Amino acid sequence: MSDSATPRVFYFDNYASTRTDPRVVEAMLPYFTEAYGNSNSRSHSYGWKAEEGIDQAREQVAALIGSKPAELIFTSGGTESCNLAVFGVARMYAEKGKHIVTSAVEHRAVMDPIRQLEREGWDVTYLPVDTTGLIDLAELEAAIREDTTLVSIIFGNNEIGTQQDSKAIGAICKDKGVVFHLDACTGLDTEAINVDEHGVDLLSLSGHKIYGPKGIGALYVRRRRPRVRLQPMMLGGGQERGMRHGTLNVPGIVGLGKAAALCLEERDADRARILGLRNRMEAAFMELEEVYVNGHPTQRLPGALNVSFNYVEGESLMMGMPNVAVSSGSACTSATLEPSHVMRALGVSEDLVHTSIRFSLGRFTTDEEVDTATEQCLASAQKLRDMSPLWEMFKEGIDLSAIEWKHD
Amino acid sequence: MAYSDKVVDHFDNPRNMGSLDKNSTEVGTGIVGAPECGDVMKLQIQVEDDRIVDAKFKTFGCGSAIASSSLATEWVKGMTLDEAHNIKNTDIVQELALPPVKIHCSVLAEEAIKAAIEDYQAKKAE
C-alpha cells in the first residue's frame, strides 16, 4: 500500500469513512478464526460463541442510542438501514396512507428510495432548507397529513455538517402520530442521541462512520409506543425478527458493537478535541478574504468544515495539496462532476458551488495534521487565485455577475 | 481519478501564466467558459506580423483545464494566426491524456485560442 518514499497523506475525509479503530479490529479477529460459527447454529459451541458476540454487540449499540437491545436490526450498512426504514415502513403502512415527508438535503440512501416510491405512486413532500441547511419546523408540522406514514430526516448532514433540530422534529412527529426515521449515519461518533429523548421510531447508523468496519450497520426499530413494523426487503432464514433475513455478519457486528462502546466512552472527549481543531482550521481560513463556510455557523457537527474559496475551483484546490485527503465540497459523486443537491438546496450560488471543498475531522486527526493541511490549503488557494482570471477581475473591481459569459 | 503526469506537470509548473495588456492593439484576449460551470479560461496572444510572439493564460478550473490552457499557450507561441486557428481540442486531449470527463477542458482551450484570435482581428479591423 505505501512505501517510505511516498509522503504520508493526511486524512481529512472522516465523513466519507473513518479508520477502523485498532481496538475494534482486535475485538473482531477471533470471530474470523476461532468463533466462526453461524450465530443461528444452536447445536454446538461455535454457534453459541458467535451468538454471544452478537448479543454483546447488540447491548453495546443499544447503550449508545439508549434503546433496548432487541430493538436493533443489523444490516449491511447505512444505505441498507435507510432503505429498509423507508421502503419497510412505506410498504407496511401503504393501506393507511401513501404520503412521506422528507427534506431536500437527505443522503441519497434516503432520497433515492423515496424517489422510487414516488414513481410507484407515493406522494412526497420535500421540505426546503434555509441557507444554513435547516428545515423549518412550522413547515414540517404543516406538511404532515392524515395519510402521512413516514417522516425521514437526516440528523447531521454529511456534506455540510448542519444538525437538524431532531428533538423538536421527534416531538412534532409524536404529537401527530407519524413514524419518524432519523438518519444518524453521520454524527454519531461525537453526538449523543437517545431514541426516547429524540422521539425517534427508526434510526439508521453505520459502522464505518464511527470507527467500525465497513459493510455493517444497524437499524433501530421501536417496539413499544408505537410498535413499528417493517416489510422486509429480502426474504430468507428469518433472522432479525423477520425484518432482515440472512446470516449475520458476526465479525462485523462484533466490530460495530466495540466501535459503539468506544464512542460511548470517548465521544465527549473526542467532540471537544475535534471541535477545537476544526475551529482552529476554520479561523485560519477565514483570515483570507472571500472565504465562506457552508452549513450552519454553530448547529454543525464538530468535524465538518465545508468551505468555499471564492474564485478558486475546488478540484484544482485539492490538486494543489496532494498530501491532504479531502472531498470536493460540491460534487455529491465526484465521478459525475455535478454539483450536489445539498449545495443547491442551500441556495449557494452556482459559481460558489464549484469553489468548495470539505474537510472532515475525526478521532485520529492530530494537531500536526491540522496545521500542515491548513498551511497547504492556504498556499494552494493563494497560488490558484494568482492564476484565476476571476480573481483578477474581482481585484479590478469588475462585477462578475454583470458579465454575459459565453458558454454552450 | 489520477491525473496524467503531463497534467500534473502543467499544474505544478504552469507555462506562461499571467496577463498581457488587454488594451494594446497588438494583444488579442479570449475569455471563455462561465463561473457557474466551474471553468473560465482567459487566453491572450501578442501578435507581430501575423505571428504570435507571446501568449499568456489565467484559468479558473480543474487541473485539466489549467493544463489545457497552459499547453495551449505553449503551442501557439511562434505560430502564425492560421496555424494557431487550426489547433484542435483532440490534439490537446492526446497530448495530456485527458479522460472522457475532462474533454470539455480541451474544447474550452481550443475556443479560447479562437476567441483570442478573433479579438485581435476585430481590433485590427477597427
Image (cartoon, rainbow, N blue to C red):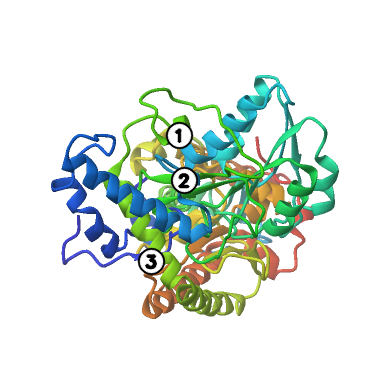
Residues at marks 1 and 2 touching, judged by CB atoms closer than 8 Å: yes
Disc 1, SS: helix
**Secondary structure beneath disc 3?**
helix
What percent of the width, then of the height, locates residue A326? 44, 59
- Give residue A359's position: percent from left, percent from top: 49, 63
Residue depicted at 48% across the width and 60% down the height: A64
Q: What residue type is labelled 3?
A: Leu
Judge the density around disc 2: few (<14), some (14-19), many (≥20) Cα neighbours within 10 Å.
some
- The numbered mark at residue A154 is none
Q: Which of marks 3 and 1 is in front?
A: 1
Q: Which residue is labeled 1 in the image?
A: A241
The residue most toward the front is A43
The amino acid on which the numbered mark 1 sits, given as a three-letter code, is Arg
* Callout 3 touching callout 1 (CB < 8 Å): no
Label 3 crowd (10 A; few <14 / some 14-19 / many >=20): many
Q: Mark 2 points at which residue?
A: A70
A145 sits left or right of A20 in the view: right
Q: Quote the CA–CA distance across marks 3 and 2.
A: 21 Å
Q: Nearer the viewer, residue A108 or A39?
A: A39
Residue plotted at (35% across, 30% down):
A246
Q: Residue at x 84, y 51 (%)?
A: A138
